[in-house]
Image: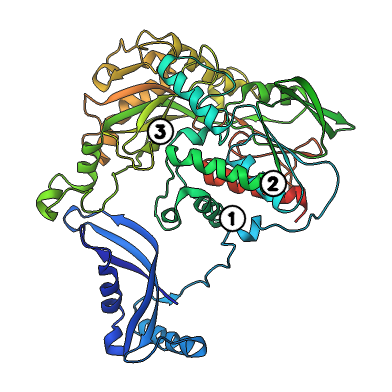
Amino acid sequence: MLRIREIRLKPGEPRASIARAIETRCNLEKFGYTLDEWRVFAESVDARDKARIRLVYGVDFSVKRRGGDTARGRAAQDAEADLLRRLRARGRGAGVAPAPPGAGGPDARFFAPRSAPGTGSAPVIAGFGPCGMFAALTLAAHGRAPVVLERGRDADARAEDVRRFFEEGALDPESNVQFGEGGAGTFSDGKLTTGIKDPRVFAVVDAFARAGAGDDIRRAGKPHIGTDVLRTVVKNLRARILALGGTVLFEHRLTGLILRGGALCGVRVETPRGAQELPAESLLLATGHSARDSFAMLRAAGLCMSPKPFSVGLRIEHPQRFIDAAQYGENFAAIYGMTPRAAGLPPADYKLSVRAEDGRGLYTFCMCPGGVVIPAASEPGCTVTNGMSERARDGAMANSALLVDVRVSDFASPDPLAGIAFRRDCERKAFDSAAAPRPYSPPTESLADFMREDSALAACLPAFAASAIRRGLPRLAEKLKGFDMPEARLYGVETRSSSPVRIPRGGDLCTNLRGVYAGGEGAGQAGGIVSAAVDGIRLAEAILGV
C-alpha cells in the first residue's frame, strides 16, 4: 500500500469524501488507476485559520489498474512502484506504507509469550499504574511470572471508594484518586500524548487499543482514553497479565527492603492478613509520585535519591463553549453552517505558556475538554485538585492546571524529601482554607476574587507562585482571547503534576541497591501515561537482560 498525508476536508464534509480526495490528489484517473482500498492512519484538526478550518488525514491506500482486477503479489508491487514514481516526480509527498503488523499487532514485539531467559525468584513490582502494569506485562510475556504489589484496591472497588470520597468526603488513604489499580491516571482524562521517540510507544498504544480503548487512539493526533473507558482497559490488561502467569495482589503495600551485602534478597509487605516477607532478587519500584511514605522508607533503606524541581498552582475552569469559540472562531456556525460538534470537530483544547519576569515558567498542563475539576487527596489533612474527563468529553466545562515552576532552591533544605514537605505545606493550607466548601473539596474563587490582595486561594500558594499567576494571566490571554475572564473559576491546589524526587539509575537502569529498579513518574523518570508505560517496559527488559 502507499501512504499520503495532508488529505484535507472541510468541517462537515462526510468521511467518505476521503476517497475522492485521494483520487484527485494522486491523479489516479490520469495515470490509469482506480482506488481499491484505503484506511486512515492519522487524523487531526488544523484551526490556525478560522475561516479555513480543515480536518486533516493521513491515509494508506492501494490501487488497481483501470478496467482490471485488483493487483496482487508482484503485479501489485509494480503498480505501486509506478504510481509512487509518478507522484514523487510531481512533488506529491507520497511514500510506501509500513507493512501491516502480524496477527499479534505491534505489541507482539514486546508482549508476545516466549520462553523465560532466566531463573530465580519471581520479580516483584511495587505499584500497578502504567509503569508497573507494562513492566508486569513484559515480564509475564517472557515467562518470569512477576508478583505485583498494589497498595490500593482493584478498579471496581476503587471506583466505589472514589465515589464515596467525591460525595461524602470520606478519604481512604490506601484507595483513592492516587492509589489503586491503574494509578493516578485512571481518574484523569487518560491522555496518551507523549513527546518521547521510542518504538515502544506504538506497542503501548496498541496494547491499550486491544484492551478496549478503541482503534481511534492509534490514529488520533491527540489520543485519549477517558476515565470511564480507562477503568475497563486496566482490568483487561490485568487479565492479560494473569493469563500469562503473573500475579496481582491488591491491598498489599511495600513496607521494607531486605538487603544482604547491598543486594536485594526480599521485601516486607503489609497485607490484609498482616505483615509478610517475600523473597525477591529483583524489585521494580513503580509507586507513583504520591507515595510519600514509600519515599521515606526507601530513603531509610539506603536508596539514593535527590530533590527534583516540580510545579505548583491551581486549576482554571471555563465554559467549554468559550474554548470552542476561542479556538474554532466565534463565527464558526455562520461560516460552516453548523456547530463545531456537528461538523465533526472534537471539543477544543489549548496549551499555553509564558515566562515570568524572574524566569519562572507559567503554563497550562493536563487540559481536560468537557471535563470536571475533582478533589484528588491521598493524605489526611491535605487537599489536592486535578482534572478528569470521560471519553466523550461532553461536559459543559473545560479545565486545566495552571502551574508555576518550583526550583530546588525554593525548598527549605537540601534534604531529598524537602520537595515533599514543600507541596504538603501547600496542600495543608488548601485543606484549612476559608474558601474550601468542605474538607477535601478544593477551595475555589472566581478569577476576579483571586486577583484581590485578600484572596484566600492565593494564600494557599507560595508568594512567588501566586504572583506569577496574577502577572501571567493577561499574557496568557494574549494567546487565547478571554482566558483571563473575571468569571473564570480557580481551584486549589494543584501539586501532583510530577514527582518532587528523582531516583538516579545506572547504565543498567539499576539503582545503587543491587536488584532494585525504580521507574515511572514517581522516580522522576517519566511524565504521563505513555512515557511511564514505556519506562516500565525498559526496566523489565533490564531485569530480563534482553
Q: Position of residue 136 (x, y in %)?
A: 67, 44
The number of numbered badges drawn on the structure is 3
For mark 3, give the secondary structure.
strand
Q: CA distance from mark 3 to mark 1?
A: 26 Å
Residue at x 41% of width, y 55% of height: 216
Name of the residue lying farthest toward the right: 261
Q: Amino acid at mark 3?
A: Met
Q: Earlier in the sequence, mark 3 or mark 2?
A: 3
The answer to whether residue 141 is above or below residue 442 is: below
For mark 2, give the secondary structure.
helix
Q: CA distance from mark 2 to mark 1?
A: 12 Å
Q: Which residue is mark 2?
A: 539
Name of the residue lying farthest toward the left: 334
Residue at x 61% of width, y 44% of height: 239
Q: CA distance from mark 3 to mark 2?
A: 29 Å
Q: Quadrant of the N terminus?
A: bottom left
Q: Position of residue 485 (x, y in %)?
A: 21, 28
Decide if residue 203 is in sight here.
Answer: yes
- CB within 8 Å, label 3 to label 2: no
- Whether residue 435 sits left or right of residue 413 in the image: it is left
Q: Nearer the viewer, residue 111 or 541?
A: 111
Q: Earlier in the sequence, mark 2 or mark 1?
A: 1
- Whether residue 105 sits left or right of residue 230 in the image: it is right
Q: Amino acid at mark 1?
A: Arg
- CB within 8 Å, label 3 to label 1: no
Tell us which disc is closer to us: 3 or 1.
3
Q: Nearer the viewer, residue 530 or 476?
A: 530
Residue 173 occupies quadrant = top right
Q: Which residue is mark 3?
A: 388
Q: Amino acid at mark 2?
A: Leu
**Label 3 neighbour load within 10 Å: few <14, some 14-19, many 20+:** many
